[in-house]
Structure formats: structure tokens, C-alpha cells
Amino acid sequence: VVAYLLLSGYDLLALRYVGARIGLIRTVITSLIAYALSQTLGFPLFTGGAVRVRYWSMWGLSGPEIVRATTFVSATFVVGVAAVCGLALVLEPTPLLALWHVPALPARAVGATLLMGVVGYALWAIEHGGGIVRWRRWELPIPRPTLAFAQVALGLLDWSVAGLVAYALLPSGHQISPLAFLGV
């Protein structure tokens, strides 16, 4: 339940990013339907995305706003994965990495690189938040720092909760710590 409510946070942040005012209940219901379909059927951009397009357009969002909001949801997903993987690889105990036949130094380097990407994104939002990135005929607003920090925190929390749900399903007697499991 907590994991699905956190997933609704992706849509709440995305709609805030594009300046849409749909309302909490509508947003959460749409999000739950979109994630239920995408988690069940796969192909989230097409399945969950179709649900969002249907409802969001019905509630007044334009095509470009839907594209920007969907892109924001995807970026939040990527930032969350990078943050959790980066932290897990940097903080993972060396003996556990050796057990998996993963050399510690490259694992830590990958983890540090992922974390630098997340920190770089946050710093970029601090420096340029509220500005616009232009590429060809596309314009993408840069999130304000508070929204970027919320994005990082939500992604990190979502992936941690999802990992801990799976961790709770492990058989008793395992010797894996929650952090080590998140690293997996």
C-alpha cells in the first residue's frame, strides 16, 4: 500500500511540475489505475501512459503538458534508481561484494558515479531551476530546486520501500542485510 501511494507521488510531482491543478483524489486514482495496469501488463510508457493521457487530457492538460509530465515521471524513476543503486554500491560491505564476485573498487566507482549524477542534477536545478532547456523545437522547463529535491527524495524512498517489500518476503534465516538486499 505504501509503495503504491509513493507511486502516486510521481504523478503529483509531475503535475506540479507542469502547473496542472487536477486535485489530489483524481491524481491518486488515475495514478493507481495507471500503475496497476503498467505493473501487471508491462510496457509502462504505453499502458500507464495511455491511462494518464486519457484522464489528464479529459481534465484539461494539453498534449505538450502530458509529454512533459510523463517525462518528469520517467526522470524521477531514473533519479531514484541511480540514488538507491549508488548508495548501495558505495555503502555495501566489501565481504558481501566479494561473495557476489564483484570487485569492490569498480563497484564503489560505479556507485560514486551514480551518486555524482544525482548530486549534479540537484546542483543543476539549484543553479538553473525555473529556466528552460531548448533542443531543436522542444522546450523543457528545468525543475525548481524544491521540486528537484522532492524528486530525488521520492525516487529514493520509493525504491527503498519497494526493495524492502521484497526483502520482507525472503525466507527466515537468510544472512542478508536490508542494505545488501537493496544493492542486489
Image: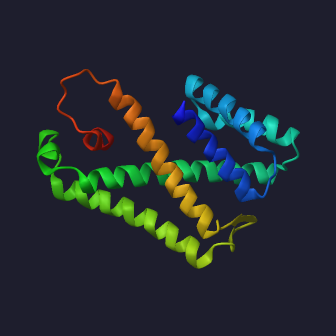
Q: Is residue 72 visible?
A: yes
Quadrant that contains the N terminus: top right
Check the image and name the residue furthest to the top. Answer: 171
Tell me the quarter of the image containing the C terminus. top left
Q: State whether residue 73 is above or below residue 181.
A: below
Numbered-mark total: 0
Q: Position of residue 124 (x, y in %)?
A: 54, 73
36 vs 57: above or below: above
Judged left or right of residue 159, residue 46 is right
Colouring method of the image: rainbow
Which quadrant would residue 126 be assigned to in this image?
Answer: bottom right
Report x, y in % for residue 146.
60, 66
In-image side of 174 versus 157 (left or right): left
Image spot of residue 18 (x, y percent): 75, 57
Q: Residue at x 28, y 44 (%)?
A: 179
Of all residues, the one furthest to the bottom in this rendering is: 127
Nearest the viewer among 103 and 25 is 25
Give the residue displayed 49% in from the left and 43% down from the top. 158
Horizontal side of residue 39 vs 47, given as left or right:
left
Q: Residue at x 59, y 23 (%)?
A: 41
Q: Return the x and y of residue 64 as percentages of the image width and height.
A: 79, 54
At 72% across and 55% down in the image, what residue appears?
Answer: 16
Nearer to the camera, 45 or 28? 28
The vertical placement of 174 against 66, above or below, is above
Q: Is residue 50 visible?
A: no
